Image (cartoon, rainbow, N blue to C red):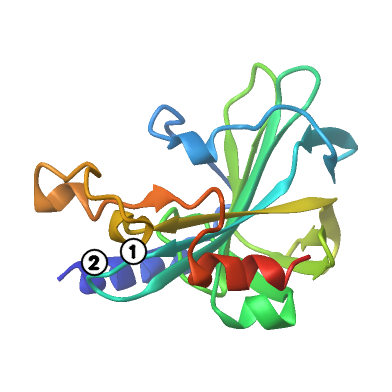
């Protein structure tokens, strides 16, 4: 049932064609999606500059079902408080190719090959791009990419250091006292393998050194 709902949401998003869509609420953003402090990663969009500490690549290992969720994200902000963000799910091929291209859609439910880009000028409503493409390339520990509109014009460019975060089941780290979700709806508990102690996380990190 959940898969069917997701597919319907994606199809509806592909059919809607407003130029830009207003983001109705930013209060529901997770901590990982909130704008990062300013730093070495830079964004140039519509003659404005934004920055963040890094472009973030994450791997989230699930046990039930046994799948891995891969995500590249950037949440940058300008000096006057404006924000510019993207989220782009990728698959395991990204670890070796270090390159990904995605179609931009105005939806929060995403899969590999799709991306969401939104921005907010200081004092104005948040807006979401509804079409275009996002391309990303990683060389060593540096990420670089661009956002193009449907007609091929460059809308934004970004570059900066790439950081890697790896979430694993507590048992992989010997965490017998790890928290347990109160209900199935809360999902499966994972913890950050900050020291890259697991072979799964360490092998991924090694490819980006």
Is there any visible trace of residue 19 in the rendered image?
no
Instruction: Answer whether labels 2 and 1 touch (C-beta < 8 Å).
Output: yes
Local crowd size for mark 2, using a 10 Å CA cut-off: few (<14), some (14–19), many (≥20): few
Q: Is residue 94 left or right of residue 162?
A: left
Horizontal side of 139 relative to 3 (left or right) equals right
Q: Position of residue 65 (x, y in %)?
A: 25, 74
**Residue farthest toward the right in the current orientation of the protein:** 47
Q: Residue at position x 55%, y 79% from top?
A: 92
Q: Residues within 10 Å of mark 1 (few under 14, many from 20)?
A: some
Q: Position of residue 55 (x, y in %)?
A: 71, 50
Numbered label tally: 2
Residue under the image location 10 percent in, 41 percent down: 182
- Can you give x and y, in whole percent of width and height, for residue 127 in the image? 59, 38
The residue drawn where x is 37% and y is 56% is 173
Q: Residue furthest left?
A: 183
Task: Name the quadrant containing residue 38.
Answer: top right
Q: Position of residue 161 (x, y in %)?
A: 81, 50
Residue at x-position 51% and y-position 71%: 199
- Which quarter shows the C terminus? bottom right
- The residue that label 1 is drawn on is 9
Checking the image for residue 5, the label placed there is 2
The kind of secondary structure element at disc 1 is: helix
**Which mark, by number, is residue 187?**
none
**185 over 125 or under it: above or below:** below
């Amino acid at each position: 049932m959940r898969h069917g709902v997701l597919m319907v949401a994606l199809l509806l998003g592909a059919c809607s064609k407003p130029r830009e869509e207003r983001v109705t609420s930013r209060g529901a953003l997770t901590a990982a999606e909130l704008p990062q402090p300013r730093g070495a990663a830079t964004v140039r969009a519509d003659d404005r500059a934004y920055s963040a500490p890094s472009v973030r690549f994450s791997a989230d290992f699930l046990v039930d079902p046994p799948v891995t969720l891969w995500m590249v994200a950037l949440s940058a902000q300008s000096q006057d408080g404006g924000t510019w963000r993207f989220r782009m799910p990728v698959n395991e091929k990204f670890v070796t190719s270090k390159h990904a291209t995605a179609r931009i859609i105005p939806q929060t439910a995403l899969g590999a090959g799709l991306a969401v880009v939104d921005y907010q000028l200081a004092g104005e409503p948040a807006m979401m791009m509804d079409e275009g493409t996002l391309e990303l390339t990683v060389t060593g520990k540096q990420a670089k990419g661009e956002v193009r509109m449907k007609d091929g014009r460059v809308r934004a460019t970004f570059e900066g250091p790439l950081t890697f975060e790896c979430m694993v089941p507590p048992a992989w780290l010997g965490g017998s006292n790890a928290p347990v979700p109160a209900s199935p709806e809360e999902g499966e508990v994972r913890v950050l393998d900050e020291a890259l102690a697991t072979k799964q996380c360490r092998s991924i990190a090694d490819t980006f050194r």
